[in-house]
Image: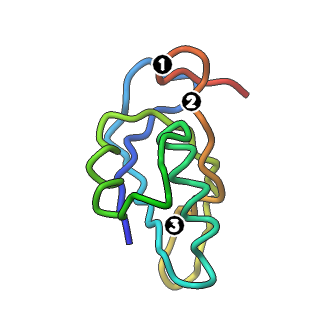
C-alpha cells in the first residue's frame, strides 16, 4: 500500500487550505487496477511496472500535482467523511484547476 496526503486547494482559492485528503493505493487483487491508474496519473505515466517496486514509486510522489474528484458523505454515526472517487491529472498551469 502507498499512502499519500493530498493538500487541498478549492477551485476559487489561491492558496492551499488546512484541509488534507488521504489517498491509499492498495495492491490487493481487487484494487490493483485502480491503484496503478491513480499512480500513473500522479506520476504522468512515468512508471515502468515491470521493473518498479511500490517503495520506489512512493519516493517519487512528494511534490507532484494532481486533482481529485471527491464525494462528501454524511453519516449519522461518524459525521462527514470524504471519499476520493478519482485522481485526475493537473490542469495546464502547475497546480491549477479546470472544470
Query: Up-down: is 25 above or below 96?
Result: below
Residue contact at pointers 2 and 1, CB within 8 angstroms:
yes
> SS for tag 2?
loop
The structure residue drawn at horizontal position 31% and vertical position 44%, both measured from the top left corner, is: 60
Relative image position of residue 48 (x, y in whole percent): 48, 51
Query: Mark 1 sits on what residue?
Result: 94
> Dot 2: within a 10 Å radius of its alpha carbon, few (fewer than 14), some, or many (20 or more) residues?
some
> SS for tag 1?
loop
Query: Mark 2 sits on what residue?
Result: 90
Residue contact at pointers 2 and 3, CB within 8 angstroms:
no
Please name whichever residue, 11 or 64, is drawn nearer the observer in this view of the structure. Answer: 64
Query: Up-down: is 50 above or below 93?
Result: below
The structure residue drawn at horizontal position 49% and vertical position 22%, both measured from the top left corner, is: 13
CA distance separating discs 3 and 1: 28 Å
> Residue 55's image quarter?
bottom left
Query: Mark 3 sits on what residue?
Result: 81
CA distance separating discs 2 and 3: 24 Å
Amino acid at each position: 500500500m502507498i499512502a499519500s496526503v493530498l493538500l487541498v486547494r478549492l477551485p476559487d482559492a489561491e492558496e492551499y487550505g488546512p484541509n488534507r485528503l488521504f489517498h491509499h493505493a492498495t495492491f490487493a487483487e481487487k484494487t490493483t487496477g485502480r491503484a496503478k491508474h491513480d499512480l500513473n496519473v500522479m506520476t504522468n505515466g512515468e512508471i515502468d511496472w515491470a521493473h518498479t517496486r511500490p517503495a520506489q514509486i512512493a519516493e517519487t510522489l512528494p511534490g507532484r500535482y494532481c486533482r481529485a474528484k471527491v464525494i462528501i458523505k454524511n453519516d449519522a454515526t461518524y459525521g462527514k467523511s470524504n471519499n476520493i472517487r478519482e485522481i485526475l491529472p493537473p490542469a495546464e498551469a502547475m497546480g491549477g484547476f479546470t472544470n
